[in-house]
Each structure stands twice: as C-alpha cells, then as structure tokens.
Amino acid sequence: MQALIIVDIQYDFLPGGALAVPRGDEIIPVVNRTQQDYGLVVATQDWHPAGHKSFASAHAGRHPFDVIDLEGLEQVLWPDHCVQGTNGANLSQLLDTRRVEAIFRKGMAPAIDSYSGFFDNGKRKNTGLAGYLRDRNVTAVSICGLAADYCVYFTAMDALQLGFETTILEDAVRAIDDAAYASKREAFAQRGGKLRNT
C-alpha cells in the first residue's frame, strides 16, 4: 500500500508565522486534493516544549539561524516556533484532516531537535511512524509539506533508509531556502528517491 505523509503544515510555518516558509500556504489545496490518491494518510506535527534548546532564545547572545554544537550535533538555532499548546503549533484549519488517520508529534525532547517524522536528529529515539506504516503493510510513501529543505527532506531520506519506496511531491512542498533545497533534492534522487508532481 502507498501512504501519504503530510509534514508540519502548521501556522508557525505558514505566512505570518514565527518561522514562515515563503508561499507555504500555496501547497494546502494541492495536499488536500492529492489525499484521495492514497490508501493511508498520516501527518507530522512539530511540538516543542517552551525553552527548547533549538531556539535561539534559549542561548544567551545567540541569534536565529546561528549554528551551534548541541550535545554533539550541529544545530541551527531557530526563532521560537510550534510551542506546545500555542496556535502556532496547530495544524492549519485549511488543511483537510478528515482522512488523516494518525498524527506523529516530534521535537518534544528539550535538548534535541527532530526534523524527520521518523527520528530525532541524533536517531536516539524514533517516533513510531515506521512501525505504524509497516503494520499497515505500507511499502511506498509520498511526502509533502513544509519545509522542503528541512523536515520534508529529512523525513524522505529516513524513509529511503528504512526501505520504503519514497517520492517527494514537488508541487506540494515549499522550501525556506530554494538553493539549499536544490542540492538536497539532488542528494535524495541520487539515493534512489523519486521526485514528481501530484
């Protein structure tokens, strides 16, 4: 079976949000439309505790987009975003969630970030997504959402590594940095990933 993974379509990643992805709202109608093509639809949700160590505000003298070493991992420092219980962490009301069977939250451990829907950035803990997909006899996944150069990309690369046939739906993603995404999508394709429109 094929599954659709909808990544982080939350208010803080949409125009006007704390970490807005340019034109991120444009993908929502595409994501809504393509859900009918899949036997299973799941979603991920960034869900940080207040004061998360990936936030620039948690480090005196640091600014958003600085890069530091955080417990042995390179970490981009972000503006505070998707804090548990805030509106910014909510999935957009424009996203049709009627077919979303499960939502996998990530980024909850205070001292490690989690771009991928499958693992934290150090692969110290998994979210349960891979087991859920396997229990549903999923062999192929298509990935859409925000942001293409971070959470979509790392979710897709982990899906490949886990043995799923993996496709990024290019008209249903947007990047923070288009140039960075161009090199990452090339790396994804070289690993056997597929790129197509819905």
Image (cartoon, helix red, strand yellow):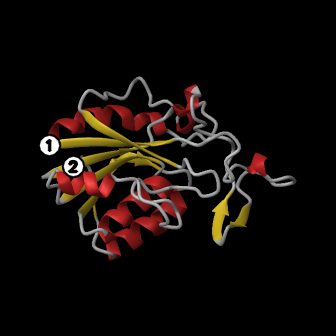
Q: Which mark is residue 3?
A: 2
When asked about the image quadrant of residue 31, the answer is top left
- Residue 3, compared with residue 153, is above or below; it is above
Circle 1 is placed at which residue position?
39
When asked about the image quadrant of residue 84, the answer is top right
Residue 79 position within the rendered picture, expressed as x and y whole percent measured from the top left: 69, 44
Q: Amino acid under label 2?
A: Ala
Within-10-Å neighbours for mark 1: few <14, some 14–19, many 20+: few
Residue 177 position within the rendered picture, expressed as x and y whole percent measured from the top left: 56, 55
Secondary element under disc 2, as helix, strand or loop, is: strand
Secondary element under disc 1, as helix, strand or loop, is: loop
Q: Amino acid under label 1?
A: Gly
Q: Residue at x 24, y 41 (%)?
A: 41
Q: Residue at x 38, y 66 (%)?
A: 157
- Residue 154, compared with residue 176, is above or below; it is below
Contact between labelled residues 2 and 1, with CB atoms less than 8 Å apart: yes
Front in this rendered view, residue 40 or 120:
120
